[in-house]
Amino acid sequence: MNRSISEITQIWDRTLIKLQEKIQDRKVYGAFFPDTYIHSINNGVITVIANSGFSKTMLNTNYRDVIEETLAEITQSNYQVTFIEKSEIPRVSEIISEKKETFFKNAKVNPNLTFDNFVVGNTSNLEAFQASVVVANSPGKLYNPLFLYSASGLGKTHLLHAIGNHVKQNSPNLKVLYITADEFTDEFIRFVRDNPGGSLKDFFRTVDVLLMDDVQFLADKKSTSETFFHLFNLLVGSGKQIVLTSDRHPSELKGIEERLVTRFNSGLQISISTPDLETRKDILRMKISLNNLNIDDFDEEVITFFAENFTNNVRELEGALNRLLFYVVSIAPTKHVTMEVALNSVQSLINVKDAVTKLSETKIINVVADYYNLTPALLIGRNRTSQVALARHIGMYLTREILDLPFARIGKAFGGKDHSTVINAITKVEKELKEDPALIQAINEIKERLQ
């Protein structure tokens, strides 16, 4: 029940009268009680202002029980009493600030997306990762704004949350706000509806690091974009950090005011590309570990198979892995994940026959490389030393003989070689097989390994 100021005053006046009767030491009462008064009554708690820090300690330690007992007699209610000094009373500005926290009340940084579990590739996302780390360590000092752009599902959102988590952990006094452009638009519309003529600036003055996802969705929203333009200037002008993501470079954004695009271009823009094969394999291993599973329970060819067949983006790759994990847990439970299990789990997602062919290409490359103590990367690369060239030619020959693939397809499997290069390699191996018993033995041993 809300009480008026006069009612609260009367309660404490009556309490003091009774306390004067109960406390025998006149000096104690005169030193600690006369200047006290009730500041607030909320949720069963009465907050009383004491006249000094020593008085606050004395009342809390020695007289709380008798005060609560006396209040119960007067109010017929059981209140908990707490004492504070005048200096501890929240200032009006702090109360207003707390009220403003209701904006973006559902916004939060995902604690599971960190720099530690972000898989860094050699070229695809290395620069974006490095710039994000710099920004997280020195918010507002460099690269402001940092603008990350790429197709969907390549890690932009992960980096935004990683920045937020790093700042929150290492600079807990800084306020971090992660939102999407759609959430900003929805909040802006609600604010204008409920606060005609008001401004969001007061709220954003409390934000130290703004992380906004998918700014391309501000397109064709004139009022929202105009408001964001002014907030952008406010934050950057105050030395606050802004990190933005988009599906395209700022200069390619359509439907957004030129002056806002200019602001986006004023910082650092970095693109993220599709991860290469080895990065995709590392991503799969990381995801498997994050699911508390042992990577040793997955055949290496399963990892390679998924990395080679789900290449559009990380979300597609993760979705396929989730399908596999669901399959081995709920549909066909097994501890060890073989290639047969993997194929069964995703047969609704891909052309299994084609996938098996791709897998066989990779297997031939891996086995030939292993036979000659080389890496698969050397075999499909540009190295032309005699040993590498021989192994590459044998790999092309076996791929043609075993899988009967077109020359162009074989060339693609071996790092994008021209079909004429493949023909020459196969012809050379076929000729040498007629004269070189050692080569015949090597190819037979490789075939045994493949089986």
Image (spheres, rainbow, N blue to C red):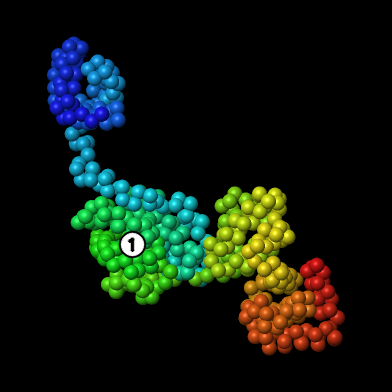
How many labels, in total?
1
Q: Name the residue at 58% across, 51% down.
A: 291
Query: Compared with residue 380, is residue 350 higher up or lower down, i.e. above or below?
Result: above
Q: Name the residue at 71% across, 69% down.
A: 353
- Mark 1, Cα crowd under 10 Å, few <14 / some 14-19 / many 20+, is many
Q: Name the residue at 83% across, 83% down.
A: 433
Residue 44 appears at what percent x and percent y? 29, 27
The answer to whether residue 138 is seen in the rendering is: no
Q: Name the residue at 65% across, 62% down.
A: 348
Dividing the picture into quadrants, the one containing residue 62 is top left
Q: Secondary structure at mark 1?
A: strand
The answer to whether residue 223 is seen in the rendering is: yes
Q: Amino acid at mark 1?
A: Ile
Residue 116 appears at what percent x and percent y? 49, 56
Quadrant location of the N terminus?
top left
Dividing the picture into quadrants, the one containing residue 352 is bottom right
Q: Which residue is mark 1?
A: 242
Quadrant location of the C terminus?
bottom right
Query: Compared with residue 296, is residue 307 higher up or lower down, i.e. above or below?
Result: below
Dividing the picture into quadrants, the one containing residue 205 is bottom left
Left or right: 68 in relation to 219: left
Residue 344 appears at what percent x and percent y? 70, 59
Left or right: 375 in relation to 160: right
Query: Compared with residue 42, is residue 109 higher up or lower down, i.e. above or below?
Result: below
Residue 49 appears at what percent x and percent y? 19, 29
Task: Work out whether residue 417 or residue 180 is closer to the camera in this orientation and state it.
Answer: 180
Query: Compared with residue 52, is residue 413 higher up or lower down, i.e. above or below?
Result: below
